[in-house]
Amino acid sequence: MEANRPNQTAAGDAPGQVEEAKKATAAAQAAKHLPEVRLVVLGWRWPGKSLTANTILGREEFHLERAAEFCVKRETEVQGRQVIVVDTPGWFSTQDTPPSYKQELVRGASLTPPGPHAFLLVIPVGMFTEVDRARITEHVSLFGERVWKHTIVVFTWAEVLRTISIERYIRREGKDLQWVLEKCKRRYFVINNCIFGEHPQVGCLMERVEKMVAQEGYYNPEEVEEEKKPLDENSNPAREGRELGARPKQNSGLGLSKAMEVDTLSN
């Protein structure tokens, strides 16, 4: 007990820091016991997005053999929590996303009243380009600027990195991927979708969501509707992506992006 006293009085602002730490701890502890967790899954039209949603559920509910055109909601229980998962229409990497798909994408947030606790932005490991950043910006911005405060990046297919850590991969991919992560306050999670049934990582993901909720609360679609800009004002990233020549991920060492992408590349 005596040994702790110098540390408590060494800094003049120590009492304030201790109080802030207590508040953060209390918020985290309260978040651990959320009876319900509401999730919306976003991403490209690749199986990784729906496969991640299936992994959370612990069973195959979202069909992988065809690209979904509508939001689908399913529920499960994870370590005493009721978990609601909404899988949304994925966006294209080589084509413009139809307006009807965008409208359905936004509708996904309203399927988890009063609003989702988290948006899971699924990104498959591979070469991440300026085009990918533009496509993410185009579609995530449909939910308003506040959505980033409630978003966690979920990396899939990370097992192909073998001995390379996810941190090293993020550094290697450069400013575009890092920009996305900074928008999410560097909240990211790596999931292995090759494990079926009861998944040991899903509980950890729920804890990550609950920690974010303790800090940010949940996303309220009604509040965000007031601050959203018209779609026309947010369309520049899409045009920029087309000018750059939007394409599937290449040279990643996986060959997965081409093989698993639903929409085909037309030359």
Image (cartoon, rainbow, N blue to C red):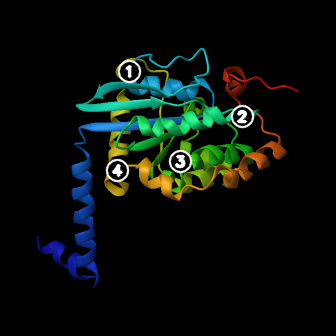
Image position of 256 (left or right of 227): right
Q: Position of residue 131 (x, y in %)?
A: 74, 44
Q: How many residues crowd mark 1 within 10 Å: few (<14), some (14–19), many (20+)?
A: some
Sequence order check: which comes first, mark 3 or mark 4?
3
Q: Position of residue 220 (x, y in %)?
A: 40, 49
Inspect this view and state whether residue 224 appears.
Answer: yes
Image position of 172 (left or right of 95): left
> Which of labels 3 and 2 is toward the front?
3
Q: Which residue is mark 2?
A: 93
Q: Which residue is mark 1?
A: 58
Q: Amino acid at mark 4?
A: Val
Give the CA distance from mark 4 to mark 1. 23 Å
Q: Position of residue 172 (x, y in %)?
A: 66, 48
Q: Amino acid at mark 3?
A: Phe
Inspect this view and state whether residue 168 appears.
Answer: no
236 shown above or below 195: below
Q: Amino acid at mark 1?
A: Gly
Image disc number at residue 213: 4
